Amino acid sequence: MNSPETAETRSGASALPSIDELLRTETGQRLTAALGRTHLTVLARDAVAAIRAELVADSCKHESRSAADLLQDAASRMEDAWAAEQRTSLRRVINATGVVIHTNLGRAPLSENARKSVIEEAAGYCTLEYDLATGKRGRRGLRAESLIAELTGAEAAVVVNNCAAAAFLVLKVFAAGGEVVVSRGELVEIGGDFRVPEVLAQSGAVLREVGTTNRTKISDYVRAISDDTRMILRVHPSNYRIIGFTSSPAVDELAALARERGIVFFEDLGSGSLGYRGGTAFADEPSVSQSVRDGVDMAAFSGDKLLGGPQAGIIAGKAECIERLRADPLYRVLRSDKLAYAALEATLDSYRRETERTEIPVVRMLALGADKIAERARRISGTLSDSGLRVETVDGFSAVGGGAGPTANLATKLLALCHDRLSADQIELRLRSSNPPVIARIVDGLVMLDLRTVDESEETELVKVLFRVMS
Ligand SMILES: *Cc1c(COP(=O)(O)O)cnc(C)c1O
């Protein structure tokens, strides 16, 4: 008696392996150890289901595949799925884009001291909220915050999770239920979805716009202040510039106005160059020290932009204001963790010792001259002469990134890569798929590597990747 022909038998899907068979294959056993039986079972089911769907869709072809072939196919799909999952995990990359503060690539690379401090001081038990002198509870962030105060000239400082959190905390504590006066030219969106009007609305404050997109005068602020006004907010437009016929009042003028009217003056600086002892000059970037000297009540900036430390939102200002921020329940929600504090303390300590130009990667990379980069580029291109790549050094520009001056382009020397058999897209993909991944950019149809953002200690590794990718 013949059994009725079903879609299953017609398609050959009945020859598909069982999940158990698949897990017993050599691949299955190897992967069980790496990812656990439960998760591997999910991948195995997906692999078999995908093949079944293809067989059913192609059943009119009447090509029957052997059980061994199907088993092999399922095992290799399972392996591919695992490789794809692994690619989504956090991995170190070589940043050859020349964008120093690259938000998608983790912004500031930490200094050697900061890395060491995270691992050796903070990864295990540590004195996060413990005072070794008294054996009692201590204050989280005490050391980092006193360093910030010292380096910026502010009376006090407090640290939260990021600059967006810092701005939100200040607005909520000092302006909720009242009005905040902001210039129209500063109602910007900053990379990574930070929109000034939205943060303000979320904090419970009401936005009072003054002036025009390109020009705002002190008299505009004067007219806008009423009994409902709690704060003057100044936002550094960061990655956005209006060039030409523009003006806005000086920080000290606004500070005087706020003082006279008994309201708070808060400046969201964003990138936050410390400007310590003259600091490293960043074209048109305002410094935290200057804002403090000009009389702001509070200034907020990111830990992982020009400062060159971990993700953090730092607020420096008047002691009385900082105390109110720390006492608010929202501070508890937004506070930083021990790993960030360890990295931040070590980063700030480089500034205190005045060694930031050599120790902090962001500061070091920004200070690199095109001639030094050209020398490294020539050295690398020399070693690549028999790699199958054609390498040229060409003039170009690096970028500060991270919302710092979009106009502040830094002259650099780029390595332009060409290959007889590979297109620019293919080269870029191979670099990105290598281990470690090398992130490059394509300019005018050529793959370009900018050594400004490649640490000298990564050069040997970069050359190895280039040889491997091209062979
Ligand atoms: C970058 C930036 C922010 C957001 O900072 P995060 O640390 O990314 O939260 C806020 N304000 C300004 C002016 C900025 O430049």
Image (tube, helix red, strand yellow):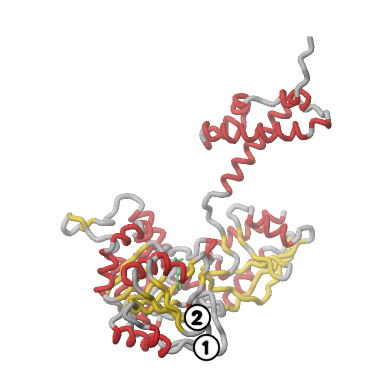
Which numbered circle lies on residue 306? Answer: none
Q: Is residue 342 visible?
A: no
305, 176: nearer the viewer:
176
Q: Is residue 235 visible?
A: yes
Callout 1 crowding tier (Cα within 10 Å): few <14, some 14–19, many ≥20? few
| Disc 1 from disc 2: Cα separation | 9 Å
From the top left corner, tell me how far across and down residue 436 is, in percent.
Answer: 58, 54
Point out the image quarter for the C terminus: bottom right
Q: Earlier in the sequence, mark 1 or mark 2?
A: 2
Q: Quadrant of residue 110?
A: bottom left
Q: Mark 2 belongs to which amino acid?
A: Gly
Asked if the residue at label 1 sits under 8 Å from ligand 1, the reply is no
Direction left: furthest residue:
134
The number of discs equals: 2
218 vs 235: above or below: below
Name the residue: 35% across, 54% down.
120
122, 211: nearer the viewer:
211
Which numbered circle lies on residue 246? Answer: 1
Direction front: furthest residue:
227
112, 159: nearer the viewer:
159
125, 235: nearer the viewer:
235
From the top left corner, tell me how far across and down residue 337 is, in percent.
Answer: 35, 57
Query: Element under label 2?
Result: helix
Name the residue: 52% across, 78% down.
405
Q: Mark 1 belongs to which amino acid?
A: Thr
Task: Provide the residue designation for mark 2.
Answer: 185
